[in-house]
């Protein structure tokens, strides 16, 4: 197990291109595998989660070449997918497990999906329930609650699913099954979750109907292969946004960051906290807006993060909690029960690990309460295999009064393989 030692930093300065968006990279590989012909992807995230997605589609018979951030996919379309001779391993990736389950539900062969110890604890009923209602034949541990899932693909029919949670994985799984189903499939969610599936399906030639928090499509549509440019991941940029915002004297430019409005909750929070940042060079590619973000250190104020904001920043909450320790006053994070079913229970891990730094933070039933500003002390902290916990604690280490150690730091490779190198390159004292 790797250990990273992180020293306090005065400020961060410089420019970085953060790696490709994880959600969009997964979808580029999946949709390229469903489209007949040649799909090329530039800016792909070569993180472990997205490599698991590539590995699965190769096992399903798709020809995929990947070289760093460039991917070429040659497929015979959905009907060309073949029964895998091996078990399909999603690794640590919930997105892969849930979206691939939706695709396999309608493919006329048998497959088994499994993953690592963290995946084995994450709820699958949220997708197996609607997929089963659509006619899918799925068996799984504890009555389909958990992986491994055994899927016998067969004829499925569209449904109108009203989801209790705002989850892009649930919505996408159902829509992907709907693409191969008879009739219309519609998903309604309480708040709009990230809409990369909708935008990319449209770019691949699928017709969708969108209305507020609902989206529907007709089954039987085929995808047209194309080129996809993946913007940088705002969830990865978040670590540098938070670090630069809280360290006075910082000035960092993050280039080509995806700013899809369903993902920019962190920018709304930075505004509410009175952070000093600007968005420049906006452009749109493949339906996804991107821009450069310039951020400077400043005095920050506590804020409340809840309701419809939560799905727009769900993966950024660990690092926003770190930022809140350095803001004036109280920050309240609520309506975020979903944090409990991520790679770790992120309410518990964030609170427990930040307490090791001396933060004033308490867990609540659906979030946390943080009082600041608190001087942090160097700490020995652990990722528990959760990439975002490790990177968030690295940011906390920058504001501490002495060195900190991040144990099991290799977890960062799930979404940001060169995170610690990039962090070092932005330090003014490196
Ligand atoms: O669809 C996606 O790419 C993702 C959706 C979110 O999960 P939920 O759909 O479970 O909220 C997010 O936390 C995850 O990192 C990626
Ligand atoms: C929750 C995450 O991903 P997934 O659900 O795909 O494992 C994440 O990247 O923070």
Image (tube, rainbow, N blue to C red):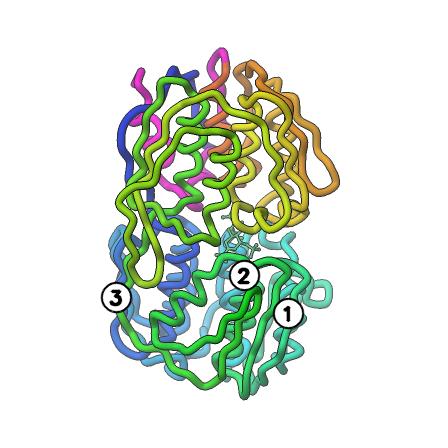
Q: Residue at x 42, y 83 (%)?
A: 221
Residue bearing the label numbered 1: 128
**Looking at the image, is mark 1 or mark 3 earlier in the sequence?**
1
Relative to 273, say whether 138 is above or below. below
Alpha carbon distance from label 2 to label 1: 12 Å
Q: Within 8 Å: ligand 1 and the Cβ of disc 2?
A: yes
User: Where in the figure is residue 408, as x and y percent of width and height?
Assistant: 50, 33
Relative to 336, say whether 77 is above or below. below
Sort mark 1 into few (<14), some (14-19) or many (20+) by Cα contacts within 10 Å: many
Q: Could you tell whether 217 is left or right of 188 in the image?
A: left
On residue 227, the disc is 3
Q: In terms of image quadrants, where is residue 362? A: top right
Residue bearing the label numbered 2: 169
User: Where in the figure is residue 35, as x and y percent of width and height?
Assistant: 34, 76
On residue 8, the disc is none
Q: Could you tell whether 122 is left or right of 393 in the image?
A: right
Alpha carbon distance from label 1 to label 3: 32 Å
């Amino acid at each position: 197990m790797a250990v990273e030692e992180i020293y306090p930093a005065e400020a961060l300065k410089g420019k970085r291109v953060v790696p490709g968006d994880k959600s969009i990279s997964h979808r580029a590989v999946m949709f390229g595998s469903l489209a007949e012909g040649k799909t090329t992807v530039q800016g792909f995230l070569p993180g472990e989660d997205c490599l698991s997605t590539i590995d699965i589609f190769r096992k399903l018979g798709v020809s995929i070449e990947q070289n760093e951030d460039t991917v070429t996919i040659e497929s015979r379309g959905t009907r060309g997918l073949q029964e895998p001779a091996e078990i399909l391993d999603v690794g640590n990736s919930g997105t892969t497990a849930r979206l691939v389950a939706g695709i396999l539900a309608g493919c006329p062969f048998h497959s088994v999906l499994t993953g690592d110890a963290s995946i084995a604890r994450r709820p699958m009923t949220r997708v197996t329930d609607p997929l089963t209602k659509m006619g899918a034949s799925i068996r799984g541990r504890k009555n389909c609650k958990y992986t491994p899932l055994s899927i016998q693909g067969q004829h499925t029919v569209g449904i109108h699913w009203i989801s209790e949670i705002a989850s892009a994985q649930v919505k996408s799984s159902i829509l992907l099954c709907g693409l191969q189903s008879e009739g219309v499939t519609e998903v309604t969610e309480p708040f709009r979750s990230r809409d990369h599936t909708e935008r990319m399906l449209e770019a691949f030639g699928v017709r969708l109907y969108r209305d507020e928090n609902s989206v529907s499509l007709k089954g039987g549509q085929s995808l047209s292969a194309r080129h996809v440019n993946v913007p940088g991941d705002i969830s990865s940029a978040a670590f540098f946004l938070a670090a630069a915002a809280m360290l006075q004297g910082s000035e960092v430019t993050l280039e080509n960051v995806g700013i899809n409005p369903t993902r920019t909750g962190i920018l709304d929070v930075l505004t509410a906290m009175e952070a000093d940042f600007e968005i420049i060079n906006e452009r749109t590619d493949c339906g996804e807006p991107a821009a450069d973000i310039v951020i400077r250190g400043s005095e920050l104020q506590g804020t409340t993060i809840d309701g419809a904001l939560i799905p727009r920043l769900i993966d950024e909450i660990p690092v926003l909690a770190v930022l809140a320790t350095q803001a004036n006053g109280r920050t309240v994070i609520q309506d975020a029960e979903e944090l409990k079913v991520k790679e770790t229970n992120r309410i518990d891990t964030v609170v427990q690990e930040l307490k090791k730094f001396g933060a004033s933070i308490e867990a609540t039933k659906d979030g946390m309460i943080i009082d600041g500003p608190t001087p942090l002390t160097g700490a020995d902290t652990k990722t528990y295999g959760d990439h975002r916990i490790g990177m968030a604690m690295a940011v906390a280490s920058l504001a501490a009064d002495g060195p900190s150690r991040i144990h099991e730091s290799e977890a960062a490779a799930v979404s940001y393989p060169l995170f610690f190198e990039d962090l070092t390159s932005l330090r003014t004292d490196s």
